[in-house]
Amino acid sequence: MVRLNFPSFAIRKKERAGRFYIWDSIRGKWYVCTPEEWVRQHVIQYLHRVLNHPLGRIGVEVALDKGRLRRSDIVVYDAFLRPEILVECKRPSLEITRQSFDQIARYNLDLKANYLMVTNGLSHYYARVNHAKKRYDFLPKLPLHKP
């Protein structure tokens, strides 16, 4: 797999019948290691090991609304189980564009998370959402979790 722009994490991988799988510590099972899943598992480790978010407050493939089949890649919840960070993961070969950020901003209309992250594993973009002014401001990084 492609070397991503994250610290080096010990991520469980295996090969079976010519297919590669990656362990998802949130969902507790093996998934086919697609390029997007490779990025998603690195983001989970980054949120947990670097930013100190508890694994129990990280959701993967969270349904955004009823009736439509939209799902967010990752949602990090605060102590009151309100969405705090919404993450959109793209495969490394896909360039992050304005449309990528517009997609996550639309998803956030339902969730109302305070922070957004869009990444392809190589480039990462972060923003703080100002719900009152209906805008977001780009940040150099996400804040550390404070227990």
Image: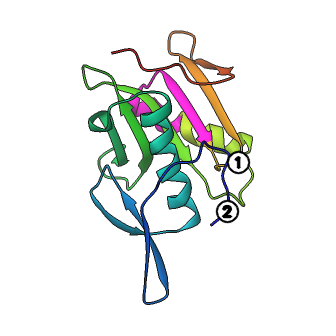
Report which residue position mark 1 lands on: 122
Residue 30 lies, in percent from the top left, at 34, 67
Local packing at callout 1 (Cα closer than 10 Å; few below 14, some 14-19, many 20+) is some
Residue 142 lies, in percent from the top left, at 56, 24
Q: Amino acid at mark 1?
A: Leu
- The magenta-colored residue range is 106-118
Magenta stretch holds residue 39: no
Task: Compute the Cα span from label 2 to label 1.
Answer: 9 Å
**Residue depicted at x 68% and y 22%:** 138
Report which residue position mark 2 lands on: 2
Q: Is residue 47 above or below residue 71?
A: above
In the picture, which quadrant includes the N terminus? Answer: bottom right
Q: Amino acid at mark 2?
A: Val
Local packing at callout 2 (Cα closer than 10 Å; few below 14, some 14-19, many 20+) is few
The disc at residue 114 is none
**According to the image, what is the colour scheme of the structure?**
rainbow
In the picture, which quadrant includes the C terminus? Answer: top left
Which of the 4 image quadrants contains residue 36?
bottom right
Residue at disc 1, secondary structure = loop
Q: Nearer the viewer, mark 2 or mark 1?
A: 2
Q: Is residue 80 above or below residue 62?
A: above
Residue at disc 2, secondary structure = loop
Which of the pair 61/20 is nearer the observer?
20
Labels 2 & 1 near each other (Cβ < 8 A):
yes
